Amino acid sequence: MAELSGSGPSSPLEVELRDLGRRLQVPPAPDVTGRVRARLERPVGDARSRPDWPWLRPVAVALAVIIAVAGGLAASPDVRAAVADFFRFAGIEINRGEPPATNGTGRLPGQTGLSLAEARRQAAFPVQVPAALGRPDQVLASDGTPPRVVSLLYRAGPGRPPANADGVAVRIDEFDGGLSPGFRKYAYEAEEITVGDRPALWLQGPHPVLYVGRDGQEYLESARLAGNTLILQIGSVTVRLEGGFTRDEAVAIAGSLS
Amino acid sequence: MLVARYTAVAHRTAVVLGAGNDAEDVVQEAFVKAFRHLRRFRADAPFRSWLLRIVANETKNLHRSSRRRAILALRVTEGTVEEIVDPEGEAVAGERRDRLVGAVRGLPEKDQWVIACRYFLDLSEAETAQVLGWPRGSVKSRTSRALDRLRTRLAGLEHVGEEVAGG
């Protein structure tokens, strides 16, 4: 594996250093939750806020979720949906428990690229495309034939949100979510909204997500941090739209699905 | 629950990288910064590396502001069970560890960083690169050079405490 090739077998000195590392005395970790929360509750732009750090690279963090989960941050008044330990919305389970490590590849089981026409031919459910974004740049079918999930990927471009680290601006996963959940998400707050007259759920900010197979099995390999996500159900099909868009932009895109 | 999980690794990182008594503040600052910058980050990435990167940078800032240079302001726990029943062996092993600590402390600062990340924190090469903000290749070459310097220092016992020349 590429990841291991750089390490090679450990020399005696390296073994000794690791042993030393295990012996280093580290005091018990403090509980900083309360103080972190107190500082975050101060208005932004407070004297303590600092200039940007050039060394930060644009990566996502589940911290909002983590701090909210651990500290029980009060939901802002306009966030209506208080989340129980978990609940299901369409074919997606929103869980408030401890998320899995999100260092998977993000790949869904059996994921393969294909044309939109081929995906539509194979899928047992109607694959919808948002007129607002046009034809997807890439189409993926996952988990069997017929595929359980069809994913539409859009790269950045005019009228589209900026791309994430993988070059994806918008990702739309569609699957028949009538029977069992296809994704499990870990988030504390979710906002109930509507797209047209359809109920939808908006998850703001990065949150861990993983794929759940037909048999309820979690695919840890698929675990990753997802960006802002809008979930809605069209017929029996669950659609999750993910991207660096605002809620209103996401609603507009979802409203153009046909 | 979860915050405890990340607090522990963040705290250990801060301590091992030399934050000393300020480790708690570093961790707190890192969480606050990570949270405040949250909305800017949309991409998929391992959360842990990013948090540890903030911790490492906060610790570096601390070094700069306090002129604290000791990466390894650390105490070593002495004695495994086997060594306690073999006091003579323990004495030898303890002496060897003291020399190793001394040798690491004498390394250039960047060497200490990379040794601390790779071995004391047991981070992979890739994660070390992310945490220190270096190219992967630099982590590799810096590690290899730091190990060579350590071997030199350990071999020349009589020179312990003396700076090894070169950068």
Image (cartoon, rainbow, N blue to C red):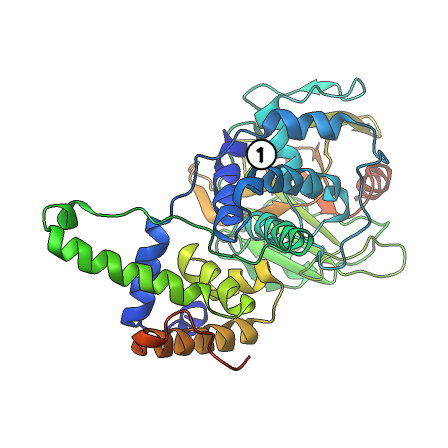
Q: Nearer the viewer, residue A225 or A55?
A: A55
What residue is at 32 percent from the left and 73 percent from the top?
A: B154
What residue is at 52 percent from the left and 45 percent from the top?
A: B20
Rendered location of residue B149, percent (x, y): 42, 77
User: For this view, does A67 lie left or right of residue A52?
Assistant: left
The number of numbered badges drawn on the structure is 1
Is residue B48 something that shows in the picture?
yes
Which chain hosts label 1? A
User: Which kind of residue does numbered mark 1 sit on?
Assistant: Tyr
Q: Is residue A90 above or below residue B60?
A: above
Question: Please, what secondary structure does the residue beneath circle 1 have?
Answer: strand
Q: Is residue B30 above or below residue B139?
A: above
Within 10 angstroms of label 1, few (less than 14), some, or many (20 or more) residues? many
Q: Nearer the viewer, residue A239 or A166?
A: A166
User: For this view, does B132 lie left or right of residue A58?
Assistant: left
Rendered location of residue B144, percent (x, y): 44, 77
Which quadrant of the rendered structure holds the C terminus of chain B? bottom right
Q: Find disc 1 in the rendering and name its residue.
A: A186
Rendered location of residue A222, percent (x, y): 51, 50
**Snapshot quadrant of residue A112:** bottom right
User: For this view, does A63 lie left or right of residue B5?
Assistant: right
What residue is at 27 percent from the left and 70 percent from the top?
A: A12
Is residue A187 something that shows in the picture?
no
What residue is at 48 percent from the left and 39 percent from the top?
A: B8
**Snapshot quadrant of residue B120:** bottom left
Q: Is residue A89 above or below residue B88?
A: above
**Snapshot quadrant of residue A28:** top left
- Farthest residue toward the right? A159
